[in-house]
Image: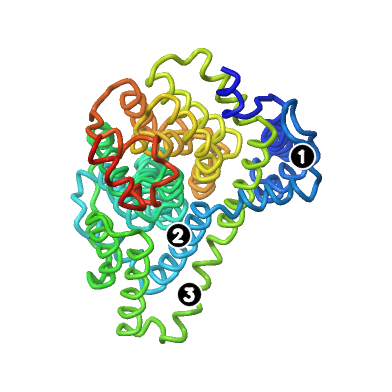
Amino acid sequence: MDEEEKKKGPSSFMGLMPLIGFLILYILSGLISGKFDSMPLLVGMIIAGIIGLALPAPKGQKKLSIAEKVNIFCEAGGESGLMMMVVIFILAGAFQGVATKMHAVSSVTNLGLSILPQNMILPGIFLIGCILSFAMGTSMGTIAALMPVGVMLAQKTGINPLVIAGAVIGGAMFGDNNSFISASAIAAVQSQKVLMKKKFLLNFMYYIPAIVLNCVFLALYPIKHIALTGNSYSYNVVDIIPYLIVIVLSLCGMNVMNVLMVGIVSGIVIGIIHGDFSLIGSMTYIQQGMAGMEDMAVICIFVGGVVGLMKYLGGIQWLIDTLSKNTKTQHGAELSIGMLIVLLCVATTNNTVAIITVGPMAQTIGKKFHLSRTRVAAILSMFATNVQGFIPYAGQCLVAAGMLHVSPMAVVPWVWYCYLTLAMSLVLVFTKFPKVKNEALEGYDNFENLSDDGTPLNSVEDAAIAAH
């Protein structure tokens, strides 16, 4: 037992103080200012890092100088898997910058509106949101692009604008979880070393019932006869090609970095042919897109550093031990991961940051309870995006409500899709479907010897898996 305790490392509640301090500051600033985005996440994480550097070493842990603690912070923040995540974030931003300028976003939206049946306006808006967010990889971008169309439809048809807002937010959250270039999806798969395609297939399998039910509920909502004729929705199918390339190549299992680079090149070529920009001019939009993800990339590095300090201080181990006391089954372990994500999302209103923070803890829980890495990655992104959609002070509800000039709380009851997907997330946790066929490939026993997509790094691991 002593040997096992040494292997685990120290366990101390005080080791959670960096995270607790961050959450207290974040919540207090929101309560005092009335705006929960008043505390910049990066500033909050810097303060959390300072708290971690100031705390003394726990009992049984070697005491380190400030310089040595800073070294722990830097090593954890610069960990190879984390840096890979940062690079992917930046490439995703570059792709989005090019795709927006060469009219891919407007073409996707207008194509959907042009083929929308008049008696299916509400489920149609929801499905357009799903397609748009899946292509764009951002819920906020989808809401910003589609909500003005929703406002216009509400004004022209008399449909309850809150129902439209709920449909738009629901569609936006679909892509936030399932898109191959979504920051939260990337964070989930990279933290657990899972191929994006595997997480997507598991997520989508459980989300189909929620999508169908939401479409049925929206179709049954009583509305007067409406007509969309007379509206001109211009689009060019060629402009959608970069999104189609990204989706198809990702489903084929290509590495996400290669997928994004091919998508960027295709967007540049089409943009130049259509006269949207020159080759040199495209670099400006690539930079603008990257700049949109730079903040998240830097936050990601600081979160990694803070988590490294919390490991040294025993906070991560204390949290795992505490959860394990009342957790006896794999279902309980998976639910613990889900609840951790929910708490972080509610506190920070940023599901990507929540996933990055909980990811290392999920690895430890997964190894202890022999969980499937694919299931853990799916749980991380599912719980994070479900809850994010109906937090009234999160960006999604704030933007939609702001465009309608209503209270965000008025929108919350209408985000039906998010409630349905939360229910399906619980179904995933409490069922064994689909069963894990190969524990050696799916589990955490060989985690350190796996590449970022979960494949073994050398023939030694290949032999071990074959023998298993």
Q: Which residue is mark 3?
A: 285
- Residue 355 located left or right of residue 370: right
Q: Earlier in the sequence, mark 3 or mark 1?
A: 1
Of the residues tagged 3 and 2, which is closer to the observer?
A: 2
Tell me the distance, in whole angstroms, between the alpha carbons under discs 2 and 1. 29 Å
- Residue 57 located left or right of residue 390: right
Residue sitting at x 45%, y 52%: 183
Q: Which residue is mark 2?
A: 88
- Coordinates of residue 93 in the picture (x, y in percent): 47, 63
* Type of the residue with mark 2: Ile
Instruction: Assign a secondary structure to mark 1.
Output: helix
Among the 4 quarters of the image, the one containing residue 166? top left
Q: Residues within 10 Å of mark 1 (few under 14, many from 20)?
A: some
Q: Which residue is mark 1?
A: 51
Tell me the distance, in whole angstroms, between the alpha carbons under discs 3 and 2. 17 Å
Instruction: Assign a secondary structure to mark 3.
Output: helix
Q: Are marks 2 and 1 in contact (CB under 8 Å)?
A: no
**Residue nearest the observer in this picture, 439 or 212:** 439
**Residue nearest the observer in this picture, 395 or 290:** 290
| The N terminus: image quadrant | top right
Q: Earlier in the sequence, mark 2 or mark 1?
A: 1
Say how the picture is coloured: rainbow
Of the residues tagged 3 and 1, which is closer to the observer?
A: 1
* Type of the residue with mark 1: Ile
Among the 4 quarters of the image, the one containing residue 16? top right
